[in-house]
Amino acid sequence: MSPEMINLIASSTGETLYMVAVAALIATAFGLPLGVFLATSGKGELFAAPWVNRVLGVIVNATRSTPFIILVVAIIPFTRLIAGTSIGTNAAIVPLTIAATPFIARLIEGAIREVDQGLIEAARAFGASPLQIVGKVLIPEALPGIVLGLTLAVVSLLGFSAMVGAVGGGGLGDLGIRYGYQRFMPEMMLAVVVVLIVLVQAVQSIGDRLARNLNKRIRHA
Amino acid sequence: MNAPLGYLAGQTAQRLIPAEPIVRLEKVSKTFPGRDGQPVTALQEINLAVPQGSILGVIGRSGAGKSTLIRLVNGLEKPTSGKVIVDGADIAALPEAALRHARRSIGMIFQHFNLLSSRTAAQNIALPLEVAGYDKAEIKTRVEELLALVGLTDKRNRYPSELSGGQKQRVGIARALATKPKVLLSDEATSALDPETTRSILDLLGRINDELGLTILLITHEMAVIRNIAREVAVIEGGRIVEQGDVFEVFTRPQHEVTRSFLADESGRALPPYVQGRLRPEAAPGSQAVIRIGFRGPHATDPVLARLARDLNIETNILSGSVDEIAGRPFGTLVVGVPEQSLATTLDFLNKHGLDTEVLGHVA
């Protein structure tokens, strides 16, 4: 493999990591409160608002059921508004974030719902406010599940990021399509796939280890 | 003024102004919306007063309404009608923020402990203090005091998953006491524990009541809990309190069927199966009357049957018996068979000696 090719792979990996990292951070910033709210706004719950809950649920489902490649094109005006342009790596972060936010929200909702209701009751009994219950009980207790959810979201983002080549987003997927497929360079395609496999493995094992260390429910030998 | 007079003055004052009960439920009813739109009544017209410094136990079968009852006291449930007065405040009428503040003086412990798995013993105990806004130094001192009180100083950095059931409940108790409450609510706190651990947790609660003067309201379905720790008892059935009073009085002279059924589970109260099977409501030729004799307090150890045989020449046939302790006082139960013709004389003799009698039936 030529030094040029290696350079290309390195810069594309950098673009992918940049897009995924920034999108994951922003999506978590929006998805965490959204997920917590979804988990606590049902009937008779901490922030009971069943109607808002239902409407948000529909919006989240709608976003999640839109195929990513269609989402990318459909929100181009919005992307231009936010990023100032509709092409390039920075522009690609917008659809990635929008796709990841409801996904992360649902994963966090699931993790929060796993927390024993008895803990909420105990916290209410000693005078905790709903916000204190979220901050001091629900999130810390759900943290192992939240970390596993975020790991899954990052792995999915790595997959999504391969499609943003369609809007000149760059990254590994784009490299694989343009060089590996369109220019008949199977070794490039292979290299891209190998790098992606390594990335996914790395993310998954870091996430698993972190979740395991945070989980105090199981006795550590 | 000398000491004896001061003592007398204190006594008089106490008699004239009875202490206001710290928890008072007045005509409290609670209905829940049912699944089929039909409202379900959990509690009906409950009146209950928990005197300051006492230990009151509410006993009932599951579904009797005791869980709802205890949750009314700290406002986790709101009554449909009636008043819940705790330390002078009407809990049901308090706005959310004031209710949260009031809850700091009402501790609660739970059947399944409800400890945070992500926090160590010490951190769990610290949680109510963090929520109440204590500063770090205060929290540290208070947590150490509490760990020492419940005997877990050496386990302060253990997570709940590394503790036994009894230890977890000790952490639960320490957490409930963190904000120095005036009342402790115990929701089946020993129901998930083995008898020995139950005993040690009850001892701890008794000690806390004794040393800190903390009022304890507990709900349970276990007779042993009431017998070992409570001074007053309320028996709840179908959302109503069917009997209440001093534990010894209630359990040595049970009036209601439910109260009797709790006692029947106890050893010595149950008839041996071979008697139970042959028991008839009517006397038959040659049958024996079966009577239960209750020995209370000072009479619990009297040799009455020996006197019955000696003075009246009536021979009794002992079928079962036991001597127990209820609320720290001895209480004996004896089930005997006597010849039908001597029944009236025997009952008369026993009652004259201050014993309780109950004719259970007749066996051929």
Image (cartoon, rainbow, N blue to C red):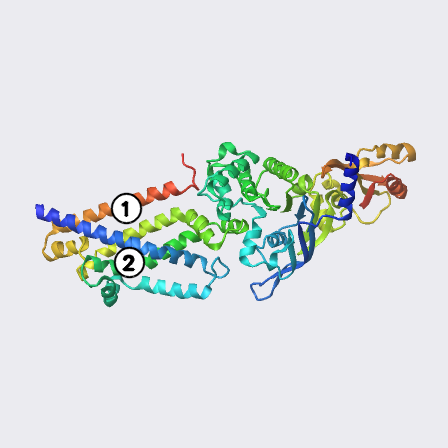
Disc 2 is placed on an element classified as helix
Graded by Cα atoms within 10 Å as few (under 14), some (14 to 19) or many (20 or more), the crowding at tag 1 reads some
For the point 75% across and 37% down, the residue is B329
Please, is residue B44 above or below residue B325 in the view? below
Mark 2, residue position: A97
Residue A163 in view (yes/no): no
For the point 76% across and 41% down, the residue is B10
- Of all chains, the one bearing label 2 is A
Q: Judge left or right: residue B49 versus residue A205.
A: right
- Of all chains, the one bearing label 1 is A
Q: Quadrant of the N terminus of chain A?
A: top left
What's the distance in space between the residues labelled 2 and 1, CA to CA?
18 Å
Residue B75 in view (yes/no): yes
For the point 26% across and 64% down, the residue is A71
Q: Amino acid at mark 1?
A: Val
| The disc label shown at residue A203, or none | 1
